[in-house]
Image: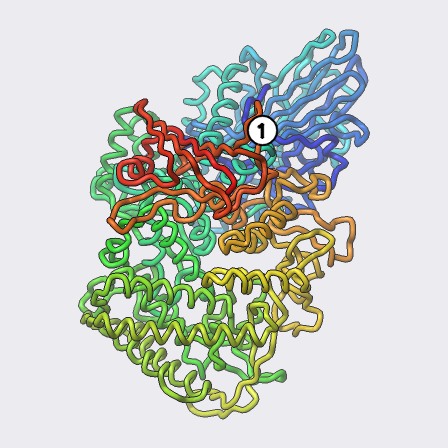
Amino acid sequence: MEIVTKVKDEIENYGVKSEFASFLPGIAGLNGIPMWCYIVNRGQAVVSFGVQDKDHGIMEFYPAHTAYQMVERMGFRTFIKADGKYYEPFKNPASKTKMSVYMNSLAIEDEEDGIKVKVSYTTLPGEKLAALMRVVEITNTSDAKKNLEILDGMPSLIPYGVGQESLKMMAQTTKAWMQVEDVNTNIPYYRVRVSMEDSAVVKKVDGGNFALGRLSDGTSLKVIVDPRVVFDYDLGFGTAVGFKETALKELVQEHQNTSNELPCAFFAKEATVESNETITLYEMIGQVRNKQVLNSFLEKKIDADFFERKFDESTKLTEAITDSVATKTANKTFDSYTRYNYMDNVLRGGKPIQLGNKHTYYVYSRKHGDLERDYNYFSMSPEFYSQGNGNFRDVNQNRRCDTFFSPIVKSKNIEMFYSLIQLDGYNPLKIEQMRYESKKAKELGIEKPFTPGELAAAIMDKSDGAFDTKEAKLFDEIMADAKETVNGDFGEGYWSDHWTYNLDLIEEYLEIYPDDAKDLLYHTNVKAFDCKEKVRPRFKRYEETDNGIRQYYYLDSRDNTTKAPSFAIDKEGKEVTMPLISKLILMSAIKLATLDAYGLGVEMEGGKPGWYDALNGLPGLLGSSMNESYELARMIDFVKDVLYKYQENIVLPKEVADFIISIHKAEQEPIDSLDKWNRKNHIKEEYRSKVYEGFTGETKEISPSLIKEIFDTFSASMKASITRAVEISDGIAPAYFTYDIDEYEKTAEGIVPKHFTMVKVPYFLEGPVRFLKLGDDISGKRVMYSKIKESDLFDEKLSMYKVNASLKDASFELGRCRAFTPGWLENESIWLHMEYKYLLELLRSGLYKEFFEDFKNAAVPFLDKDTYGRSTLENSSFIASSKNPNERIHGKGFVARLSGSTIEFISMWKLMFFGKNIFTVNEAGDLQFELTPAIPEYLIAEKDGKYYVSSTLLGNTTLRLEFDKKQDYIPGQYAITEITVNYNDGTSITENSNVLTKDAAEKIRDRCANSITIKMTPK
């Protein structure tokens, strides 16, 4: 099986290298059923796979540390007798092995004693069932022919209907339900007899897991489902005793037990193989919702050609997705990493498509959960147009750049995420699968809100399994009629940082559509997610403890809202809506009203910290976050600029308008910080009581002069607060403070603080990251950069940035991070997402030389593969820093992929190759296109005496930058001398300028340009 692809990495002798865990992406196409599949670099790699979630496993799910131990025994196995000599490949550490990593597939090789075994894996794309495809090629590399007896497969296959808890907690009892059917057909069907719940309702189980094996011509391979036939007395599955001691032709004739046992799936083949000849086994193990689906699939010819087509289809799926970032530089690993990184970003945020010529819908997304993130219950819909669940922060961040890549997204995510912001300033944690309602769908018997995949399945059920032109047309008609439902869910607690990512969506939109700014901000109405939990008044959140006053009681359930997700309605029964600019104004005021008693950080009144969620104890310590204060200042200044530009009345719900005006007055009052804290909290709590009771439905306008005055005051207050916080922290932007309540009074209202004392918290890299977004003082930022590099945030051994400085002198009450070993997880490790955020802000701030140096030291594609401990195409959540007591793991990556680091790299990639604000509006009101790339010398390729790099603009247009000489190219230090645009219709233009305007700019934005070549020369 030759996998032809643009992206590939190889790991030689993988079985003796530092252990790592990863996965196949589970992308099966729009009309395919995804499968999750986890791998490790031991044995035959695949250690666990299944459909939907852990409760639909086919090969048992294990956490990483167990997976490393189990894969050689419970993963795929190949047993060979060569001229009677028993042998198992991928077992001997001294044998020659290789792992080839692709985007949507994997291959492993083992060579020993004249036999080479190559195994290739991918998940089945474009079919009505989910399956893992496995191709086993056995080559005789000796000079003489060999008589081979081969038994290949998996020693344990979980019957359909057995959940994770049953498998882990009562596996012995669970065997009573198990059975294997249709063994005589050589396509065994594995399922429990009936539902396993201890309930009066007993249901028939239609779904099943299946296995099949074929030769190249489609001939079925004999199958063994009874593990005792294969292993005999060796119940530890160390040696295939039955196979070893019995001729294969006799073994396959033995009686097999097909019930009351955890079955296996082994395929048998005898062959005489000449020198340099190969015999290939084609295997498929999967899951279907009923036998009819399987039987329909089996009408196809399943042979070598089928497998090769499907492997090719699988490869092309991920290549098509990642063509949006196709890049060519002097560093091939960087180019491949750019694609791989983009694919992983899609897995977290989804890929936008259009349904019914109306809905922007995201496919392929899922919540991260894998061998190293064993705590998460991931889910991938086993249906067409598959989507998964996620969290507000993750999905929001990873969709940040979607308006750049896709013309269909426009303001979709802005409207969605701002509508999920509640009127009390918080938001639901969970982003659930998008569901729709349609009257036309009810004609198919769909009464409840449905996913596109469920709609497709209902249509297929009515048309004998077909989903061709007629069925696709019906699907489109129903989707065009459909309306979206609310896809947020409270989850747990209110995180203090989630709102901060929304402004990124607006700024990214305005980079592409600056001419739509007023329409977006003033004429786009957004809703408000209805609060399912209400924030307690401050005095009722505190408790006396042996360690002092702590804040432990945050939320109460509301009894006047629906349990189901919904948007807020007023007392007239109408949804509360407001223009986007009004929502920004509300958020500015409510977060300003949430500053701590010193007027510095945003308090964690919702019971959860911010991005750094391992500081789970921080809310209890009356913690506040400067990270959110920096973001608040940024949002206020953004709003202020808009207000001054457009000079329009602001329409708000009356309760919101009164709240904002009252907060403004309180902010202006010449009172001490504690009195101001009490005053603003009193106003906020009164306002929130109106939120939780329901608005009246009245609106109120604020004049341009007053709203500008309000935001002048807000902006000045935040600037003063931030200046003071940085001074307190010796010139490095602080991330957090905690507070002791030294004096308090107990009243009927609760515990009333009379005096707070600040407690400084060690440095966290997030503080400078957020701070660097503010203003354009490059020299001041460079000074802070130098201080950071001299601080405990910088790991000199690795030349990387730690997520935090030492916590050894900090309170254990900060959270679980304080208990973690230094250099591990969220305690002094190199947390890639935050380090990438820091690198991005260096680049965005104009610290180009500093960025070029740090990027080369820290970005994954430039790392040493053996030190990193895994493919340098893949991100890790964290890299063990030199603070870890185990020197062996310094610089090694852990917790694979699906990290926010993917979007930070994409943002860096965008800035490097295209620069900021690629589209702007000039004084005449014309759209103009101008690039300001920043390219380090080490990425510039050379061919035939020409220097260049190429990338992909707007997900569609090939951009080639040509340079006069090989050096760093920094904005302001080079000139663009020529731009040539080749359009899709075959026409072209060439301009001796750095700016294109009017029609040329609009055609580029409309994706009418096939390619653009820009010539650059140093000044």
Q: Is residue 622 above or below residue 577?
A: below
Name the outermost residue toward the front: 1019
Q: In x, y percent, where is residue 660?
A: 30, 75
Look at the image and tell me whether residue 837 can be seen: no
Q: Toward which corner of the image does residue 222 lie, by quadrant?
A: top right
Q: Nearer the viewer, residue 25 or 922?
A: 922
* Image: 315 above or below 140: below
- Of 757 and 206, the residue lying toward us: 757
Tell me: residue 109, above or below residue 750: above
Where residue 333 sits in the image (x, y, percent)? 61, 34
**In the image: residue 509, left or right of residue 721:** left
At horizontal 57% and vertical 69% (from top left) the residue drawn is 734
Where residue 98 sits in the image (x, y, percent)?
70, 28
* Corner quadrant of residue 595: bottom left
**Residue 664: percent from the left, percent from the top?**
33, 79
Asked whether 597 or 1010 is in front, the reply is 1010
Q: Is residue 46 left or right of 771 when viewed as pictured?
A: right
| Coloration of the structure image | rainbow
Residue toward you, 211 or 598: 598
Amino acid, disc 1: Glu
Residue visible at 41% across and 36% down in the picture: 955
Rate crowding at label 1 as few (under 14), some (14 to 19) or many (20 or more) other CA atoms within 10 Å.
some
Q: Residue at x 70, y 15 (%)?
A: 139
- Label 1 sits on a secondary structure element that is strand
Report whether 497 appears left or right of 812.
Answer: left
In this rendering, the answer to whether 725 lies above or below 481 is: below
According to the image, label 1 marks what residue? 942
Question: Which image quarter is the N terminus in?
Answer: top right
